[in-house]
Amino acid sequence: MKAAFIDLDRTLLRRASGQVLNAELRAQGVVGANRWLPGERVLYGLYDRLGENVLAMAMARAAALAARGWSQAAVQRAGKHASNELMALIAPFAPSILAGLRQEGYRLVLSTTTPMDMVRAFAEDLGFDDVIATTYQAVNGTYTGRLEGDFVWGPGKLRAVRRWSLENGVNLKECVACSDSCFDAPLLSSVGHPRAVNPDPRLMVIAALRRWPIEHWDRPRGVPSIAGLEPYHLLRPFVREELFPYARFDIEGIENVPARGPALLAANHRSYFDAVAMAIVARRLGRPVRFLAKRELFAAPVLGELVRAIGGISVDRTGRPEEALRSAEMALQAGEVVIVFPQGTIPRGEAFYDAVLYGKTGTARLAASTGVPVIPIGILGSERVWPRNSRFPNVTRMAHPANVCVRVGQAVPLGLEDAVADTRAIMDAITALLAGAQEPSAIEQP
């Protein structure tokens, strides 16, 4: 048997759980409604940005004494009520990562300094197999101000994990440990598969020196973030129609894309300039998007890194295309928007003019596995800006810019059982959008 030991604050959760738990303790009458720690919000703000520090953990250690005389049942009740709010703080990609660990045969063990009675309900609701946490001693249902066992932090967390492993017949060298904190370095050093997740500055250095994997569960792999801002946010102000004076964009139907939650945007493919058209769509959406693109694009110097940094998902059509689908599935399960071109590539020859569009089944299979809506998008006229047989767009059309028409439709009704039939429904919806766009005002006139 092997286990994955998952830290709570700033690892599984996007920020510290303390404020949520303290608010619920006040709501349940465990502590006075006006009882606030001086500078509490500032302390938690620093914790959320920089991770654990000795002062904060000393205060957490002293909390056991402050809890003397509290009702254990009331604290457990507060923990149960707090579970839903903690669920809302889970890092977007964490559920799919935990599911992957379970598929690989790992038992999931929440390992945290947070008191056991405050987090057990949350761990059970999330499907963890066990919990290793700081345990307050209780006699006749009342806390005594003492601990049972170690304060589960730093070396104390390692000792607690070792005891659990011994009791459950687990070899730590076969286990995974995930944490954001440099103070968990002893635990990370003791398992066979350490992972630095959203590491604090000191753990970032340790992980780099020891070549531990560095992960961020709030965004896809390869997408950097500074103070919560991705390259998308930094580039968005510069993605403007005015930067492409040789094209005129006619875009309608953006309101059909959900403002929140996951969505698959499925567009037809006529030109390399489709990427620009979809970038304009993404800018108007006002939220980061991920997109599937050919592996060759990621191999290009500089451009490949940029594509990856803004959320591109590499598709290896000759090797393992299912890896791209899995990455897209994780993004959708995390509540993100994913752009796909079901045709896979720009049609060649007479197929380019075919009134019937044909697509691969990947989009339909993603919809079936995630249950997310598929939003059809019809693109018309992009080939006039950048023909398939040209290496560069035609930038000489300043006086008579080509009109690029983009129509965003409503979600396609799908059966989610027959990928071929659903693919046909998606492509028919895109075709209908293209047919509706062919009006004198919507296309370039000779």
Image (spheres, helix red, strand yellow):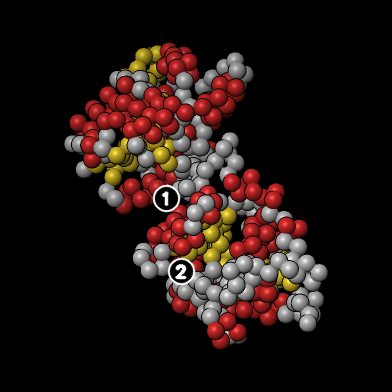
The one nearer the camera, 233 or 117, is: 233
Q: How many marks?
A: 2
**Which of the image's four quarters has the C terminus?**
bottom right
Q: On the rendered structure, is 250 left or right of 20?
A: right
Quick one: label 2, few (<14), some, or many (20+) residues within 10 Å?
many
Image coords of residue 400 (percent x, y): 79, 72
Q: On the rendered structure, is 46 left or right of 444?
A: left
Q: Give the number of the mark in front: 1 or 2.
A: 2
Above-or-below relation of 37 to 414: above
Above-or-below relation of 289 to 201: below
| Residue 371 seen | no
For the point 54% across and 29% down, the residue is: 49
Quick one: label 1, few (<14), some, or many (20+) residues within 10 Å?
some
Query: Residue 427 falls in which quadrant of the image?
Result: bottom right
Query: Residue 133 falls in which quadrant of the image?
Result: top left
Above-or-below relation of 438 to 93: below
The one nearer the camera, 365 or 343, is: 343
For the point 58% across and 79% down, the residue is: 428
Q: On the rendered structure, is 327 left or right of 130?
A: right
**Which of the image's four quarters has the N terminus?**
top left
Image coords of residue 256 (percent x, y): 67, 63
The one nearer the camera, 404 or 386, is: 386
What amino acid type is highlighted by mark number 1? Answer: Ser
Helix, strand or loop status at disc 2? helix
Question: Mark 2 — residue?
Answer: 362
What amino acid type is highlighted by mark number 2? Answer: Gly
Disc on res. 96: 1
Q: Does the CB distance between marks 1 and 2 fall below 8 Å? A: no
Disc on res. 210: none
Image coords of residue 238 (percent x, y): 69, 50
Above-or-below relation of 81 to 345: above
In whole angstroms, how far apart are the C-alphas of marks 1 and 2? 19 Å
